[in-house]
Structure formats: C-alpha cells, structure tokens
Image (tube, helix red, strand yellow):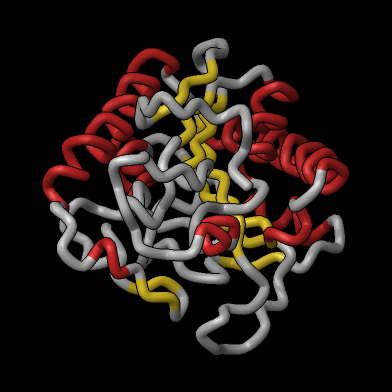
C-alpha cells in the first residue's frame, strides 16, 4: 500500500523542511498513487508491487529526514503514471511494460500532458530546494526487488550505491557499508552511469557530491527494518560528510 502520509491532493512533490547547508534527501518513487482521472488498466494489486513504487523508500526517507534533521523532496505519483527518475524523452518515462506486466492505459497516454502535470513541477521543487537549502550532499533513496518477475538472477546485494561520474560520496559510502559486513553493490543492481537522471540534473550538474542508495525492499518492508536502515544510513551519511569535508 502507499505510504498513508503521502498527500493525495496531488501536488507532484512533497517537501519536508530542514536547515540549509547540509544533506538534501530525495525520493523519486515514494508513492504508488494514481490520480482518479488516469486509468492504467491494471489490477490494483500491481500497484503494491515494486513496479508501482519503491517499497519502504518513503518511510526510510522520512526516518532519515527526522534522524538527520534534513530537508527532503518526495514524489507523490506512481512510477506507472510517470517515472520521475527518467529524462522527459526517455522511452520508459510513461511505461507500457514494467517487469513483464503490460500497462495498457499508457499505450495512448499523452506524454506531454503528464510531463507538464507531474514531471516538470516535481523537478522544479527539487531545483528550488537545491537553491534554498544549498546542500553539501544530495542523497536519493530508492529500493529494489531481490528478483525481477520477468527473469534474471537473484540479486545478492543488501544495498547498492549508485553514481555517475562523481564518486566523491559513493566511494566512502561503499567502504563504510562493506565495513559493517553488508553485501554492498558498487553501481549495482544497476549502474548510475546508465540511469542517474535526477542526480545528474540536480546534483552533478551543480558540482554537488551525491549518491543514490538502493536498499533491497524486503529489508525495509516493515517498521523494524526501516528503523534499522535509518540508523545504518544515518551513520553512513555522517561518514561520507566527514570524508567530503577532508576533500575540501
């Protein structure tokens, strides 16, 4: 189910306030909400799977925002309506197929209308947060499924750190997580050099260190898991910020 604290009036972005000059948290796939005027043509149960949203990511982002006293921006729309973590021209922006499931209502969708309604204001909210908060680190929170229904091997990682060209944050994060004995992917379960749209635009383009954190979704599917990973990632982020301060 969608996080019940995600607003459903449908502003495309939710903002959590926090002090400027520190960490800015982002969560592109926080909600599985589908507006009443959009018919995807799928069974409602599919929206509760990883194809509908990043399971546990909203709760983890909120936990980190509270633990760190950090600002955050969360998406409020299902990735099946429009994937906010894609460039506007990306073929998967309004998916016709997701992990083997057809999304028939998207076949004739007005992509431009969805970009205008959801994608542009969501990214404008992040841009505003970057200007206002002047973060020294941007961290995007995601979750991933252990095995895709459409096939492929079981993913062995508990957590992955993704990045594109700027590895200033990723390298100390990977080292810190592995030092805890966690099975940590380096640009796994997929590569940030291939898919890093939000951080490319809002962090790397501005020279701000950043990383995307992918936690296996069964590990954050309940309150206990969220609490555990909030502590793990809060400590990891603190380690990263220390490492970054030494690089300045």
Rendered view: 244 above or below 195? above
**At which x and y percent is residue 184?**
70, 65
Front position in the image: 148 or 73: 148
Q: Is residue 49 visible?
A: yes
Q: Classify residue 129 as left or right of residue 19.
A: left
Q: Nearer the viewer, residue 204 or 6?
A: 6
Does residue 110 appear left or right of residue 4 in this picture?
Answer: left
Q: Residue drawn 58% across and 36% down?
A: 244
Residue drawn where x is 36% and y is 40% of the image: 36
Picture layout, residue 54 above or below residue 240: below
Identity of the residue drawn at 65% across and 30% down: 62
* Image location of residue 54, percent across then percent down: 56, 53
Q: Is residue 6 left or right of residue 218?
A: left
Q: Is residue 170 visible?
A: no
Viewer-side residue, 82 vs 178: 82
The residue closer to the viewer here, 44 or 190, is 44
- In the rendered view, tell whether residue 166 sits above or below residue 238: below
Q: Which residue lies at the image location 62% right of the left edge and 61% below the top edge?
A: 160
């Amino acid at each position: 189910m969608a996080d019940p604290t995600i607003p459903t009036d449908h502003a495309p972005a939710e903002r959590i306030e926090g002090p400027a000059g520190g960490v800015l948290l982002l969560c592109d796939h926080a909600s599985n909400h589908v507006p009443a005027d959009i018919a995807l043509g799928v069974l409602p149960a599919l929206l509760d799977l990883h194809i509908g949203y990043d399971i546990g990511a909203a709760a983890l982002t909120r936990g980190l925002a509270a633990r760190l006293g950090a600002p955050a921006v969360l998406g409020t729309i299902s990735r099946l309506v429009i994937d906010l973590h894609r460039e506007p021209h990306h073929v998967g922006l309004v998916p016709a197929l997701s992990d083997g499931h057809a999304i028939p209502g998207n076949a004739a969708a007005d992509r431009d209308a969805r970009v205008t309604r959801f994608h542009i204001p969501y990214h404008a909210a992040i841009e505003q947060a970057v200007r206002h908060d002047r973060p020294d680190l941007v961290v995007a929170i995601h979750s991933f499924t252990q095995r895709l229904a459409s096939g492929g091997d079981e993913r062995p990682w508990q957590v992955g750190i993704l990045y594109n060209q700027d590895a200033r944050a990723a390298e100390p994060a990977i080292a810190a997580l592995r030092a805890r004995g966690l099975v940590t992917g380096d640009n796994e379960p997929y590569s940030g050099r291939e898919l890093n749209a939000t951080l490319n635009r809002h962090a790397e383009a501005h020279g701000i260190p950043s990383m995307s954190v992918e936690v296996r979704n069964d590990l954050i599917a309940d309150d206990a898991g969220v609490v555990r990973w909030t502590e793990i990632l809060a400590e990891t982020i603190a380690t990263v910020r220390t490492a970054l301060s030494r690089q300045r």
